[in-house]
Image (cartoon, rainbow, N blue to C red):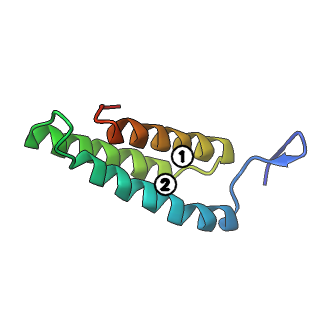
């Protein structure tokens, strides 16, 4: 474990276990939002956006820095908010 200023910067197994349901929920919500008819996307564009989302979450699953995990979750929540308003992130 590495420490910076007295705080942990690397995720422990407990941190990862706690984040797993949150990440899965966000992933599913984003995929559902991409299916919304309110988005101006054709079928191919919709599939491309889903593949892009999947790739981001797969690469994010490799992340072990608490700060980067927090940033990724914030970005996912922001993107979900945009999608729910009918806008593309």
Tag 2: Cα neighbours inside 10 Å, few (<14), some, or many (≥20)?
few
Point out the residue furthest to the left here. 43
| CA distance separating discs 1 and 2 | 11 Å
Percent coordinates x, y for residue 18 in the rendering: 62, 65
Q: In which quadrant will I find the C terminus? A: top left
Residue drawn at the location 68% of the way across and 55% of the way down: 11
Residue drawn at the location 51% of the way across and 66% of the way down: 21
Pick the front one: 84 or 35: 84
Percent coordinates x, y for residue 57 in the rendering: 41, 50
Q: In which quadrant will I find the N terminus? A: bottom right
Q: Name the residue under label 2.
A: 61
Drawn side of residue 31 relative to residue 37, left or right: right
Which numbered dot is residue 73? 1
Count of numbered marks: 2
Q: In which quarter of the image is residue 46?
A: top left
Tell me the SS state at disc 1: helix
Q: Is residue 13 above or below residue 84?
A: below
Query: Which badge, 1 or 2, comes first in the chain's sequence?
Result: 2
Tag 1: Cα neighbours inside 10 Å, few (<14), some, or many (≥20)?
some
Pick the front one: 59 or 75: 75
Drawn side of residue 12 relative to residue 36, left or right: right
Residue drawn at the location 90% of the way across and 45% of the way down: 6
Percent coordinates x, y for residue 48 in the rendering: 19, 41
Q: In which quarter of the image is residue 40?
A: top left
Q: Do the residues labelled 1 and 2 touch (CB within 8 Å)?
A: no
Q: In this view, does 18 lie above or below 42?
A: below
Tell me the SS state at disc 2: helix
Percent coordinates x, y for residue 41 in the rendering: 15, 36
Drawn side of residue 44 relative to residue 28, left or right: left
Pick the front one: 77 or 38: 38
């Amino acid at each position: 474990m590495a420490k910076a200023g007295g705080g942990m910067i690397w995720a422990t197994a407990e941190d990862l276990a706690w984040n797993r349901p949150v990440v899965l929920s966000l992933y599913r919500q984003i995929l559902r939002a991409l299916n919304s008819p309110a988005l101006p996307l054709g079928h191919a564009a919709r599939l491309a956006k889903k593949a892009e989302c999947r790739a981001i979450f797969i690469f994010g699953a490799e992340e072990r820095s608490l700060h980067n995990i927090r940033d990724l979750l914030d970005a996912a929540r922001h993107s979900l908010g945009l999608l729910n308003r009918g806008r593309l992130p």
